[in-house]
Image: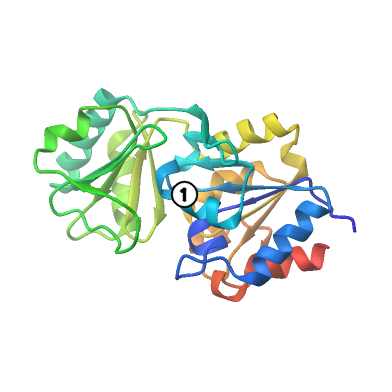
Amino acid sequence: MTFPYKLVATDLDGTLLRDDDTVSGRTREALAAVTAAGAAHIIVTGRAVPWTRHILDDLGYDGLAVCGQGAQVYHAGEHKLLTSLTLDRQLAGLALSKVEAEVGPLALAASRDGLDGEVLVGPGYRVQEGPLPAIPLQDPAELWSAPLNKVYIQHPDLDDDELAKAARAAVGNLVDVVMAGPGVVEILPLGLSKATGLSLAARRLGVKAADTIAFGDMPNDIPMFAWARHGVAMANAHEDLKAVAQEITASNEDDGIAVVLEQLL
């Protein structure tokens, strides 16, 4: 069995995972067939390692994963963090004050660095229900007390796209701002993206961008699509990502990844 790519890069939420946070049998089989044909599969997610690890363990996944929007390269088999990039907290604080000067008070959360980095949640920040652990903050100063990978922002009135656009305009070249999913707008180190993390992981595997097919569903996947040879957007993807995709497949609920991989196999 031959397969035309050496690397399959998949986002998690809205892409590899169904809406109930599981991976279908059909998709598992398609990925197993791809790796049997000699290609590598890398998960590339906005989630930091502590929010990704349980899914990788459930998949029996022992390769590399790119987590935290590209900030972390994680070896799932060895449970080891290979690289980790942190957000300059002074710059992040300055960026937030600029955003708030434009749009008013924000609700904040932050992802701490490390294998067991907690997600801290400030007053008014809406966390999606589910198994992902988060620690409520009483004192907002606590947010800045240890190294962070990213800060999450929410606004009482602006939707995700409006908030990301306003924040991007306000921060200039201090930090990057990305919309990563429903209710998830993030402040990241300048120049960090899924593409930077994926290129680091691919280099470790000896694989090039030209050998890579990537799957995703949100604007934070745009840099990954620009890096890879072929970008496939899910049917449920954000319009901004569909606009730059080479191909659109079925939704995450309808095994969109498997549909494409089976055809290629």
In the picture of the structure, the residue carrying the numbered disc 1 is: 52
Label 1: element kind: helix
Residue 158, given in percent of the width and then of the height, sits at 24, 58
State whether residue 184 is above or below residue 138.
below
Q: Nearer the viewer, residue 227 or 129?
A: 129
Residue 127, given in percent of the width and then of the height, sits at 26, 57
Q: Quadrant of the N terminus?
A: bottom right
Q: How is the image coloured?
A: rainbow
Locate residue 108: give its quadrant.
Answer: top left
Could you tell whether 258 is left or right of 99 in the image? right
Q: Quadrant of the C terminus?
A: bottom right
Residue 19, given in percent of the width and then of the height, sits at 46, 70
Numbered label tally: 1
Q: Residue furthest right?
A: 1
Q: Residue furthest left?
A: 139
Residue at image coords 27%, 26%: 89
Residue at image coords 55%, 35%: 197
Could you tell whether 113 is left or right of 134 in the image? right
State whether residue 115 is above or below residue 260.
above
Mark 1: few/some/many CA within 10 Å (<14, 14-19, 20+): many
Locate residue 177: give its quadrant.
Answer: top left
State whether residue 257 is above or below residue 37.
below
Locate residue 233: give its quadrant.
Answer: bottom right
Residue 96 seen by the camera: yes
Residue 248 seen by the camera: no
Residue at image coords 50%, 55%: 55
Could you tell whether 48 is left or right of 81 in the image? left
Looking at the rendered structure, the kind of residue marked 1 is Thr
